[in-house]
Amino acid sequence: MKYGYALKLVVDENIRDEMNQYFSMYDIVEIKVKNKHLDNYIFIKQINELIKKYNDRISLHLEADLIENFEQRSIYFDCILKKIERVDFLVTHIQNNTDVRVINSICDLLPNNTTILLENESGDEQFIEKIKNIKSTISTLHKDKVKICFDLGHCKKESEMLKTIVSDKNMLKDVVEIHIHSNIPNEHSRLKKNDKLISEIVGFMNVCENLRRAIFEIKKIDVLKYEGIEQIKLIDEKYS
């Protein structure tokens, strides 16, 4: 399993040492790319330098409302594809708009080896139905370009959705990435040693045959070298 960290990149030309520290501990760094970043030369330069150095160890988390407001976000998406070197995975959220024409339009623009990962919103118990609708109506040309990023921290406690997705083998095959953090509403805090969510996370990982990446999406890690490694250990020592 490849473990990663979701990061809001600081726009600073002297960021290299800090980034090297992240890559020394994590297999993947998932960088959040906001609309405001795309006119920032330093940010674009940083991203492209990291991609050239670390290649497939970089993924990008796009604006959460890319699909919801694609008409307004299309220029933003076009800028990403034109200004940023190719990456294997782009992550965005599924909100209310599941118009498959939008998904097809996004896939039409993607480079051949780039996959779009659709992530569940916090508390969205309709996510599975939305994904099923998309997968059943999307162009056959794009079925392999659309996969799932399942955020377990976004699930409610005792989530029926989690039980449903675990029982759906076809759905599980499309899960290639998960996000890990506490499931306290509106928080992305670290896991604690005896957190019951850990067992759910590990159990879910064990049934996802195509799962490739587990990304820690924690708002703040105070001591990266200590807490980063400890968070991975909480999961990895129980993951078979």
Image (spheres, helix red, strand yellow):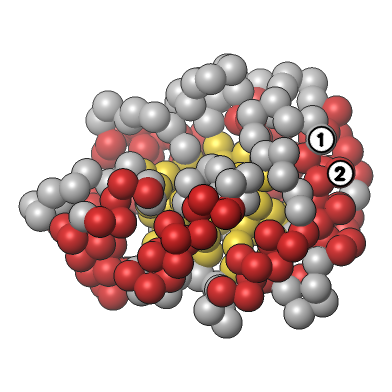
138 in relation to 40, above or below = below
User: Secondary structure under badge 2?
Assistant: helix
25 in relation to 82, above or below = above
Residue 83 picture quarter: bottom left
The residue wearing badge 2 is 129
At which x and y percent is residue 198?
A: 62, 30
Do the CB atoms of the residues marked 1 and 2 lie less than 8 Å apart? yes
**Can residue 90 be seen here?**
yes
Tell which of 99 and 27 is nearer to you: 99
Label placed on residue 156: none
Residue 239 picture quarter: top right
Label placed on residue 126: 1
Dot 1, crowdedness within 10 Å: few (<14), some or many (≥20)? few
At which x and y percent is residue 93?
A: 61, 45
Tell which of 63 and 25 is nearer to you: 63
User: Secondary structure under badge 1?
Assistant: loop
Q: Is residue 74 left or right of residue 15?
A: right
Q: Residue at x 33, y 42 (%)?
A: 8
176 in relation to 127, above or below = below
Q: Residue at x 29, y 51 (%)?
A: 37
67 in relation to 126, above or below = below
The N terminus appears in which quarter of the rendering? bottom right
Q: Is residue 103 left or right of residue 130?
A: left
At which x and y percent is residue 180?
A: 55, 37
Q: Residue at x 18, y 60 (%)?
A: 41
**The residue positioned farthest toward the front in the image shown:** 71
Amino acid type at image mark 1: Gln
